[in-house]
Amino acid sequence: MSALTAPTPSGRIATSLGGRLRSSPVCLNTRPPVAAIAPCTTPSCAASASAITSPCVSHNDVEPTMSVITNTVIVMTGPAREARYIVPALRRIEERVALMVAVVDSDGRVIVRSQRVVFWDFDGTLAFRHGLWRGSLIEALTAVAPNHCVGADEVAQNLTGGFPWHQPDVEHRHLDADAWWAALTPLFERAYTLAGVTRPVASAAASGVRAHYCDTRRFSLFADTRPVLEQLAREGWRHLIVSNHVPELPEIVHALGLDDVIETVLTSAHTGYEKPNPKMFAEAVARAGTPQEVWMVGDSPTADIAGAEAVGIPAILVHNANSAGGRSLTLHDAAEIVIRASM
């Protein structure tokens, strides 16, 4: 277990703490939660903090209530900003914290961040859309032509090879959300017309695919998704979604109630890179703060597994019969592999 260091003249310290995280994790996409060590109950102590939670660690043997959780900011004020209060507090929870890095900035904020991260694919790994893409096209067609006789399989066979992730070597960083969807309109229109839909109806239906596909009510989590994310978070792992997906993926993840366990959502529609393009993984590593331990979990042997392993990230194939041993691994299986490997 590495030792804590004293502040530099700039007011910053960095440290790694060993052990395991035992408190409940809270992760937000942009604004980390705030926690604090309370003002000391000893009358002669001038330590203060931004919230009243427990006695000052320098005058009481009771461990302070301190949210040492993934991506947490601990705001200290007054004399409590000094390392003589912050460092003992961090030491007191060393045995309960996974591999972490803590930084105290010049404003007295302690940034505590786990250096263990799991990258998760989304569709087919953590969640699924009822009806998939073919279903959304049929829903859009039904909205403009209720009496159509087109089946989902008829449009599906004409969608093969037309999405951005079918050409991972082609970057599209210049596309905003509207442009991303506009680029798919010809694909949708072609799928309809080849299935026998007239061009005017095909055009009207294609314009509605976006709204139907992104209907968050059509997405569901797998039964083991939240339990596994929470299990790994208790072990000190942060979670990022790294997916070849639509621009609205962050909103979909939010609607599924994963904001408290997913730190960041990276969709290829925003990054401009499609897995297995190594630039997508480089972007994810950078957004995660270049952590010391990283895993990739996904259901695609090519985009997720081969892509991650090509850049040195160990990967686990789930929900796929091609997994090692011929058995389709579950998310629980993936969690156990990650935990065992980190011991």
Image (cartoon, helix red, strand yellow):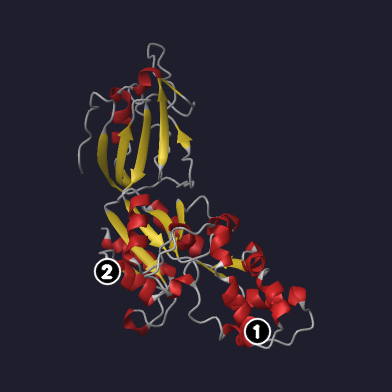
Secondary structure beneath dot 2 equals helix
Q: Which residue lies furthest to the top in this view?
A: 44
Query: Image check: 132 left or right of 73?
Result: right
Secondary structure beneath dot 1 equals helix
Question: Residue 287: horizontal and vertical position, in percent?
Answer: 37, 50
Q: Quadrant of the C terminus?
A: bottom left
Q: Nearer the viewer, residue 8 or 184?
A: 184
Q: How far apart in space, not on screen, are marks 2 and 1 (Cα)? A: 39 Å
Q: Residues within 10 Å of mark 2 (few under 14, many from 20)?
A: few
At label 1, which amino acid type do we have? Thr
112 shown above or below 320: above
Q: Can residue 132 be seen in this view?
A: no
Q: Name the residue under label 2.
A: 310
Question: Residue 200: horizontal and vertical position, in percent?
Answer: 73, 77
Which mark sits nearer the N-terminus, 2 or 1?
1
100 shown above or below 278: above
Residue at horizontal 37%, vertical 59%? 118
Q: Quadrant of the N terminus?
A: top left
Quarter of the image holding residue 280? bottom left
Q: Which mark is residue 286?
A: none
Mark count? 2
Query: Image check: 29 left or right of 312?
Result: right
Quarter of the image holding residue 106? top left
Q: Is residue 11 visible?
A: yes
Q: Which residue lies furthest to the right in this view?
A: 147
Closer mark to the observer between disc 2 and disc 1: 1
Residue at horizontal 57%, vertical 54%? 254
Question: Residue 182: horizontal and vertical position, in percent?
Answer: 58, 66
Q: Mark 1 points at which residue?
A: 193
At label 2, which amino acid type do we have? Ala
Question: Residue 107: horizontal and vertical position, in percent?
Answer: 38, 25
Residue at horizontal 47%, vertical 57%? 270
